Amino acid sequence: MKRAAGVIFRTMVLVLLGIFIGVVISNHSLMSRSLGIPMMENDKISKVLSLVKQNYVDSVNVDSVEGVTVNSMLQNLDPHSLYLPEQKATTLNEGLAGGFNGIGLEYQLLRDTLVITQVYAGGPAANAGLVTGDRIIDVNNKKFSGTKLTIPLVNKTLRGSMDSALLLAVAAPNSTAKKLYTLKRGYVNTSSLDASYMAAPDVGYIKISKFALTTDTDFREALKKLKIAGMQKLVLDLRENGGGYLTTATALADEFLKKGKLIVYTQGIHEERRDYFATDSGNFQDGKLAVIIDEYSASASEILAGALQDLDRAVIVGRRSFGKGLVQQQFSFDDGSAVNLTIARYYTPSGRSIQKSYRGGIDNYHHEISERMRKGEFFSAQSNLDDSIFKKPSPYHTANGRKVFSGGGIMPDIFVPADTTGNTELLQQLTDQQQFTAYTIDKLQPQLNKFNSADAFMKQYTVSDNEVDNFILYASQTVKEMDSHELLISKPTIKTMLKAVAARFKWGANAYYEAINSDDMTLAKAVEAVR
């Protein structure tokens, strides 16, 4: 099963009140700090902006111009120094906070009606009794369904201040009767762990999507449950993990390392060297460990993978990581906007920096992943080693003397090529149009209700050829043109996606990843490595 199925699923999920999307910030300070920099008399940027505001021929949004100007200046420094407008800064920080203010649900807009596709445990929606499949018909005694709904309009309607009330008229699946629910908006806890389950009789699996404030706590809780289930070995999946807080990455590394081991150190011209060492508080210091990475594993993910590789604590499985070795600090402005400024580089225990070059400019930097694919890196371990940065003699070695590389990400110990056999334009269209979730809502709910647990569903439910035919017939009402050859190529992936999305709708993210990973070669290699 190709990993693309897991990636494209992210486009299907609309999370009410805050979503973390591929952020690659790592920060040695958990809080932003206000700027206290005096303005120089000869500050040309400020003078030019003032001239524009007072003298330009047309009306100008100076705030917008300021943002573009500042961001352009920062991007000339490095690709990860960024200006963040207020909304983007808020979204970023909420994504890493481990929760958000809202009512706690995910949804899909289907036939101009909001259909609930996920309810967050412990949130206002869950506490009120809302369930997946419910449809919100009216809001605060005003018609809501059938009013040309859009995502911004939905978010604006459902968001609000803490403890403010929201009156919803809701219809259950396959019912026209409306039931009233009064909710109070509140703080909704979210987990940065996508999934944790037993991948084999003695092998646990944990997938982490980001390094947020609560990640270590979430990890410890998941680890505890897996140990009770019989886990002795662990596979940690960091694929598509764009990073987060540096201190969270070091806390995760501490879970696996003995006291006194150097995890990472940071250093910059204005930042003295700072070393991060393991303590004796780890909960998995001895069991066999594999870490899965890919080309989208970045920043804090690479700190963790790099430390575990350098210290020979884990076997790294997958494909070469992104290559981000820069540390950002967030500086906030009074209007809520902020600057993420690179203040240091980080170095793995062996002393290597894994930051890839950005001398070719921002565009080349951001297209480097595509260039790797073009050169065949995703499909051949040798193609990785043919890159010029890996042909130079490496002075870096692991604790046991194995050679490791710097300057271009973390090279895995076990390479697993990308499986793109099922990737087609048709599959992408079906995903972009949210047809898998729509079909689950409209057609599969009666079948899902026959199973009393996710485990029973996983073992007993198989997507038949007839079910695929029914799905394609259903989807053809939205995706008008379907290539029969592409359909043939993508059919196995469509079956997996149908089962996975249905499982998530009924039982949540754990069930989704268990289904998606059922024929994932990279996970199979990782399990084999620890066993």
Image: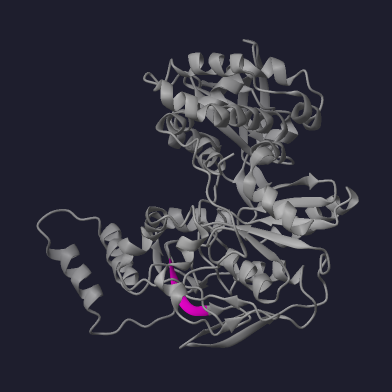
Q: Which portion, as a residue range, is magenta? A: 339-345
The scheme the figure's colours follow is: one colour
Q: Is residue 432 left or right of residue 498?
A: left
Closer-to-camera residue (447/67)? 447
Q: Is residue 302 magenta?
A: no
The answer to whether 249 is drawn above or below residue 425 in the figure is below
Residue 306 found in image quarter: bottom right
- Asked whether residue 212 appears in the rendered view, the answer is no
**Residue ID at (61%, 31%):** 496
**Residue ID at (55%, 39%):** 5
Number of numbered discs: 0
Place of residue 303 in the rendered image (x, y in percent of width and height, measured from the top left): 60, 70
Place of residue 319 in the rendered image (x, y in percent of width and height, measured from the top left): 55, 58
The answer to whether 529 is drawn above or below residue 149 in the figure is below
Q: Give the quadrant of the C terminus.
A: bottom right
| Magenta residues, dominant SS class | strand
Q: Give the quadrant of the N terminus.
A: top right
**Residue ID at (63%, 67%):** 305
Place of residue 399 in the rendered image (x, y in percent of width and height, measured from the top left): 69, 81
Residue 450 found in image quarter: top right
Closer-to-camera residue (172/444)? 444
Place of residue 348 in the rendered image (x, y in percent of width and height, measured from the top left): 60, 78
